[in-house]
Amino acid sequence: MSEPPGVTVTAPEAPPADEPSKPLAAQRVLPLRRPGRWIATAVVLVLAAQFVHGLTTNPFYQWDRFGYWFLRPNILDGLLITLEVAAYSAVLGLIGGIVLALARLSRSPVLRAVSWTYIWALRSIPLIVVLLFLYNFSALYKTLSVGVPFGPAFFSFDESKLATDMVVAVIGLSLNEAAYAAEVVRGGILSVDQGQHEAAAALGLPKSYQFTRIVFPQALRSITPNYVNQLIGLIKSTSLVFYVSLLDLFGTAQSMGATYPGDIVPLLLVSTVWYLILTSVVSVIQFYVERYYARGATRSLPPTPLQKLRTGLTGLRARIRREAAV
């Protein structure tokens, strides 16, 4: 009988006449040796070691100045503004995306046309153009009014007084985020099996109840990983609000770099590390949200990193015992 691919079975040697033969359980099955994998692993480890060595020993990075700037109050103030802009824009963008997705799936041709046009336009225009246009919006419309179209206005207000730098940044990012979130939400809704819609309709449930309790919770399994990618992109996109005079994390680093030209590289490293921390926190939250909504879709929930570590240590100890017993 031929051996399975990738496995080499060592044939037992004939024991001497005065030595008893080994039992069958003592015979070892050796995996096929793969030198290419070990060579690639060694090359990657060498390159990683060289990168870390250069990162830590190169005086150009000025790690002492990095430590000085990392927790400075002005840097933390910029970080707080980044968190505020990202949080407000993420919530408003998701709400707008849900509304646009439902309009895109509506039976009304007007709602479908308006939703499609909005998504097409906002995905085509660069974000920096949207922010700069909103920043100069008061030059086009001095006042905004609410009333009857082509008729009297009920009340009006000065646009320049309401459109602060924070408001402009949040509105610009939210408008852009809603266009992308709409397609993410629409894809998630379409991923729900049609039988779920039919079963909910057969029970006579209201449309709103069907969506909030049956369709949308199942769609979240598909929406979550895609929207978290959008959220990470949103956190990085907050660096553009510097161009509308809002000193976020990146804007503060740029401003301090102009004041202290010798610390430009440490300041860029400070902003880089803070962005890495923020996106890493979002990725951890994503894992647990996906794990929560995986209930009912998989036979067993995916293990947490701590559970994986425990399983790996248990397997390592068992392997050491087996090796020692042989």
Image: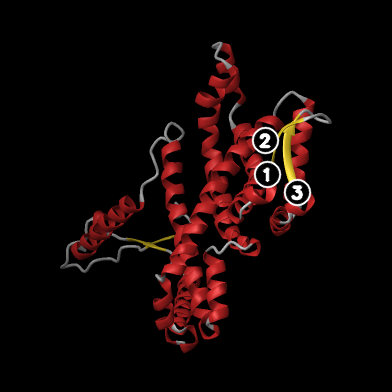
Q: Residues within 10 Å of mark 2 (few under 14, many from 20)?
A: many
Query: Which type of secondary structure does the marked residue at label 1 adopt?
Result: helix
Residues under labels 1 and 3: Cα distance? 27 Å
Q: Which residue is mark 2?
A: 100
* Nearer to the camera, 294 or 30: 294
The tally of labels here is 3
* Nearer to the camera, 40 or 129: 129
Quadrant in the rendering for residue 56: bottom left
Residue 180, image x, y percentages:
66, 46
Contact flag, marks 2 and 1 (Cβ < 8 Å): yes
Quadrant in the rendering for residue 204: top right
* Nearer to the camera, 208 or 165: 165
Residue 193 horizontal side relative to residue 35, left or right: right
Which kind of residue does numbered mark 1 sit on?
Ala
Query: Which type of secondary structure does the marked residue at label 2 adopt?
Result: helix
Q: Quadrant of the C terminus?
A: bottom left
Q: Which residue is mark 3?
A: 142
Residue 273 horizontal side relative to residue 121, left or right: left
Which kind of residue does numbered mark 3 sit on?
Lys
Q: Residues within 10 Å of mark 1 (few under 14, many from 20)?
A: many
Residue 148, image x, y percentages:
77, 28
Q: Which residue is mark 1?
A: 179
**Could you tell me if residue 296 is visible in this image?**
yes
